[in-house]
Amino acid sequence: MKVLVMNGSPRKDRGATGGLLKHFIKGMEEAGAEVDLLYSKGLELGDCRGCFNCWTSTPGKCIQDDEMAAVLSRIADADLVILATPVYVDGMTGSLKTLLDRSIPLLHGAFELRDDHCRHALREGVKAGKIALLSVSGFTEMDNFDPLIAHVKAISKNMNREYVGALLRPYAWIIEPALKQGAQLDHIYEATKQAGYQLISNGKMEEATLTTIAAEILPRDEVVKLMQQNYGEK
Ligand SMILES: Cc1cc2nc3c(=O)[nH]c(=O)nc-3n(C[C@H](O)[C@H](O)[C@H](O)COP(=O)(O)O)c2cc1C
């Protein structure tokens, strides 16, 4: 199975998203997946200009000559797309959203009715595979992921891909510093690896594994105190 992982964190592999992804990818590879990893940050990509030339005068091609052409073929070829992003202002990061905006050349311009809904048909050669979300947040409550989950579910319908779940880790920024101080948190990374393995071998991640990944590391009051120490006015 070909998997395309798009890491939307500007901190790339040094961030909390990248920290979890390392283990998640290892699990997917152990289950036999062929994993292609891209970082949206640093790609030479202009914003979508909204000209619709990719649907009219240059069907399937964007008129901007930048790195998106190569990214389009990587998306088209993926059986499974993993959208990996920290929560930024209650959604995905800007660079990942820009990349997704620029993916509309993969679709025909004309509407069709699918599931009693107006959608665009996929162009020939574009796989209708699966999509999953991996996300981390700064805040502690799981409902901070709700807008992003809703967004990714909507994207999956419009990309004609099956949504197969979300791996979510609140206040993930605490993991690396806590590990350095000797905290026993290896089970989170181990469960993240298992979730990657499960997704490839069973088509979904098990609830118990996702619960382990999201479980409390510190009581919320302690997290608030820590943030006050780190970011409070001196
Ligand atoms: C511009 C910006 C906006 C953010 N917005 C939110 C937010 O709306 N909700 C939240 O829980 N965390 C928010 N965060 C915190 C990040 O999700 C958190 O720091 C995350 O661990 C960063 O992941 P990374 O290290 O992979 O980049 C925001 C961070 C930044 C820099």
Image (cartoon, rainbow, N blue to C red):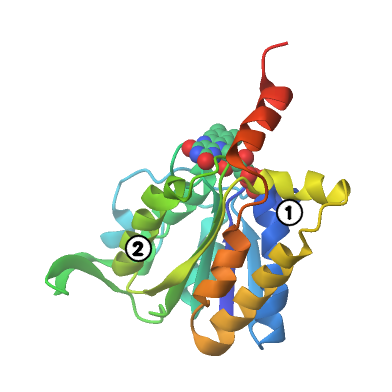
Residue at 37% across, 43% down: 49
Checking the image for residue 153, the label placed there is 2
Percent position (x, y) of residue 34? Answer: 65, 82
Relative to 36, say whether 6 is above or below: above
- Cβ–Cβ below 8 Å for labels 2 and 1? no
Name the N-terminal-most of marks 2 and 1.
1
Q: Tag 2, which secondary structure?
A: helix
Ligand 1 is found in the corner quadrant, namely: top right
Q: Quadrant of residue 116?
A: bottom left
Residue at 59% across, 52% down: 40
Tell me the kind of residue under disc 2: Lys
Residue placed furthest toward the top: 234
Query: Does the beta carbon at disc 1 come under 8 Å from ligand 1?
Result: no
Q: Quadrant of residue 152?
A: bottom left
Q: Tag 1, which secondary structure?
A: helix
How much space separates mark 2 and mark 1, taking CA atoms? 25 Å
Tell me the kind of residue under disc 1: Asp
Relative to 172, say whether 215 is above or below: below
Is residue 184 shown to the viewer in this render?
A: yes
On screen, residue 228 versus residue 124, left or right, reads right
Query: Does the beta carbon at disc 2 come under 8 Å from ligand 1?
Result: no
Percent position (x, y) of residue 218? Answer: 67, 45
Checking the image for residue 13, the label placed there is 1
